[in-house]
Image (cartoon, rainbow, N blue to C red):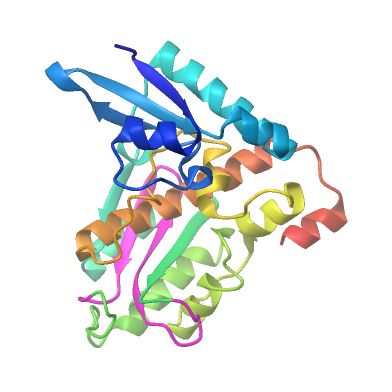
Amino acid sequence: RAPAVLTVGAWGTQSALGLSKKPKIQRWRGTVSPVELPGGHTTTVLPTVHPAHVMRAPQWGPALEIDVARLGRVLREAWAGPPEEREGHHIVIARDRATLHAELAQLLPGAPIGFDVETVGLGPTQTALVCFALSDGARTIVVPWSRSRDGTSPWWNGCASKVADAVSDALSTRITITHNGPAFDHIVAARYGIRIAAWDDTMLAAHVLASHMPKDLGHVVTMRHDVGPWKELEDRTADLPRLWVYNARDTLYTLMAWTHSITTAPPLSAATRKAIR
């Protein structure tokens, strides 16, 4: 048995992961999936694009190189699991104001904060907020906003404005990091009284730094970090606790992708930085 397997293309990935349908390989590539084998053994499956695809579309060459390097890391060091499950990080569900205030006070002073909203659907000017999350990289705080997936049962009866003010205060002295925030998260947050001050955005950064590649969060994150296929395993009909964890991952991974881009990208001109922001 192999401790880790690099599957190339959709068919190999479908077979290795036991998927019922042919996967969209560009959405699965770059992810890390532990798989149980007969006899109680396990292996780790790492999908990537097929080399033949890279021959037809050379812009995918760096993605293939990154995925092969990821296989090397897993073989040398094994996979420590998703970032949110590793030592030094924890997820908190702020079900009451006391917990929320205590956790907001623990955020790293002046640190950039990942921010992501989960809603009923698209359309930022009308969709209902279900929950949102903030993360400084060590602690991710999920704030429920509705008691149901349809966003119709308020969580914070009578004190929603105070919760929004507390979150706004925490963001007022920090840079808020989103993915497609100006076109979605910022708008939804403002509708519910949450004020975002200074900000950066990983989707806008992707347009500037790699405009020829996909801009979705899954691609942006897996080009930089070793994570599970959290986007492909999302279940929009799941219960709230599962949605909270999904929200936490989106938020933490957005911050991780931004931090990596800022620390590894070549120096940007003032005009480019203005375009990103």
Chain part drawn in magenta: 122-148
| 265 vs 108: above or below | above
Q: Can residue 165 be seen in this snapshot? A: yes
Q: Is residue 144 magenta?
A: yes
Q: Position of residue 177 (x, y in %)?
A: 56, 57
Name the residue rendered at 46%, 39% in the picture. 10
Q: How many marks?
A: 0
Q: Quadrant of the C terminus?
A: bottom right
Q: Position of residue 84 (x, y in %)?
A: 35, 41
Outermost residue, left side? 39
Quadrant of res 273: bottom right
Q: Position of residue 142 (x, y in %)?
A: 32, 60
Looking at the image, residue 167 sits to the left or right of residue 176; the answer is left
Name the residue rendered at 26%, 85% in the picture. 152
In front of the other: 17 or 262: 17
Looking at the image, residue 235 sits to the left or right of residue 191; the answer is left
Q: Can residue 107 be seen in this snapshot? A: no
Looking at the image, residue 162 sits to the left or right of residue 210; the answer is left
In front of the other: 20 or 85: 20
In front of the other: 217 or 266: 217
Name the residue rendered at 63%, 26% in the picture. 65
In front of the other: 239 or 84: 239
Quadrant of res 158: bottom left
Q: Position of residue 274 (x, y in %)?
A: 79, 61
Quadrant of res 38: top left
Q: Quadrant of the N terminus?
A: top left
Q: Is residue 4 magenta?
A: no
